[in-house]
Amino acid sequence: MIVVFGSTGTIGSEVLRQLVEQGPPVRAVVRSQQAADRLAGGSTEVVRADLADPGSLPAALAGADRVFLATPASAEQVRLESNLIDALAGSSVPLVKLAALGFDAVPADQAIALAANHGRIVEHARAQGVALTVLAPSGFTSNLLASAGTIAQGALYGSAGDGGVAWVDPADVGAVAAHVLTSSGHEGATYSVTGPDLLTFAQLAELLTAELGREVSYVDVPAGQFAQTLQGAGLDAWTADALDELHQLYRAHLSEVVTDEVSKATGRKPRSVQQWLAEHAAAFAG
Ligand SMILES: NC(=O)c1ccc[n+]([C@@H]2O[C@H](COP(=O)([O-])OP(=O)(O)OC[C@H]3O[C@@H](n4cnc5c(N)ncnc54)[C@H](OP(=O)(O)O)[C@@H]3O)[C@@H](O)[C@H]2O)c1
């Protein structure tokens, strides 16, 4: 039984979809009855549990052979994921955890908040003796959906200067996860999962312009002002600060990494931003 935590999310839903296609027994862990109802009826077993409630985890993990874990970046992330690690401790059940590209480039106490969360969680898993595989993807193409409102008005905001990112399609992250969850020899490994090409935000705007058939321009918010812009758009302070830090790493060209992990896991090329845009153009119609 492969147990998927985060199964309603961007990556977890892809992991679930691709595991179901491949056929091993899968259990989706969800928090809400609404999500449980949505997933019910197929071949997937559905169990309700909450990572904030350690008492709900043993039932979700009963009979697990492998576990996938993705949770949102937040101030609560270390606590939530550590609860699952504590529930797995001493069980020898392998855990595949979603982290982020370069999360371990510097020690957690010097890292940006998004990376520090993952560094602390991985340290905790190792201290607890959990058999861990880490997937560390680059920025998701689907992040553009969060900017759909401004893109519809012709502007893509960022603070990354001319830094490049090898944007990865969530379907490809899901494919690598499904491969790791259904084959052996991955314990202890960290896989950096990226898309095929480094693209700046200005180049993303050009691809949007070409796909949508109307002008989309990149607006580069100066370093130090992006968090304020994001809070003005409704993000909470922790997330706005974390994304500002991330964009300054992009600006410093520190995320310019392209790997071949998608090809190695799937035997095909990683999907391009153009492919993802062609499938999601309707989301930017306004
Ligand atoms: N966005 C990027 O470009 C990017 C790049 C690299 C790495 N990452 C990493 O990706 C991770 C986020 O993955 P994602 O985008 O797939 O997340 P997501 O779409 O926000 O989904 C998060 C999932 O976690 C579940 N969840 C939240 N709180 C929970 C709780 N207390 N108990 C059980 N389940 C809970 C959510 O369930 P509900 O439906 O119940 O809320 C949802 O299924 C972060 O660690 C981030 O650092 C992101």
Image: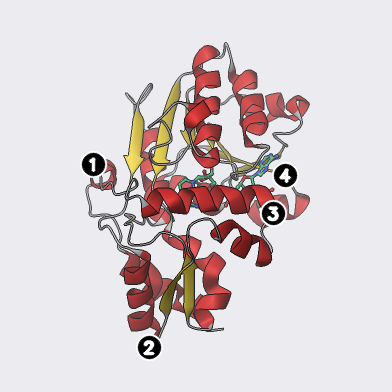
Residue type at numbered disc 1: Lys
For disc 3, the neighbor class at 10 Å (few under 14, some 14 to 19, many from 20) is few
Q: Secondary structure at mark 2?
A: loop
Per the rendering, the mark at residue 264 is: 1
* Marking on residue 31: 4
Query: Which numbered disc, 2 or 4, marks the residue closer to the eye?
Result: 2
Residue at 54% from the left image edge and 73% from the top image edge? 148
Amino acid on which the number 4 mark rests in the picture: Arg
Q: CA distance from mark 3 to mark 4?
A: 22 Å
Q: Is residue 51 left or right of residue 11?
A: right
Check mark 4 vs ligand 1: CB closer than 8 Å? yes or no: yes
- What's the distance in space between the residues labelled 2 and 4, CA to CA? 40 Å
Colour theme? secondary structure
In the rendered image, residue 111, in percent from the top left (x then y), is placed at 48, 34
Q: Earlier in the sequence, mark 3 or mark 2?
A: 2
Q: Disc 1 and disc 2: Cα gap in Å?
A: 35 Å
- Per the rendering, the mark at residue 126 is none
Q: Residue 169 placed where, x, y %? A: 39, 57
- For the residue carrying disc 2, how many other residues have a C-alpha within 10 Å: few (<14), some (14-19), or many (20+)? few
Q: Amino acid at mark 3?
A: Asp
Q: Are marks 1 and 2 in contact (CB under 8 Å)?
A: no
The 10 Å Cα crowd at callout 4, few under 14, some 14 to 19, many 20 or more, is some
Under circle 4, the secondary element is loop
Residue drawn at (44%, 43%) of the image: 23
Instruction: Give SS at disc 1.
Output: helix
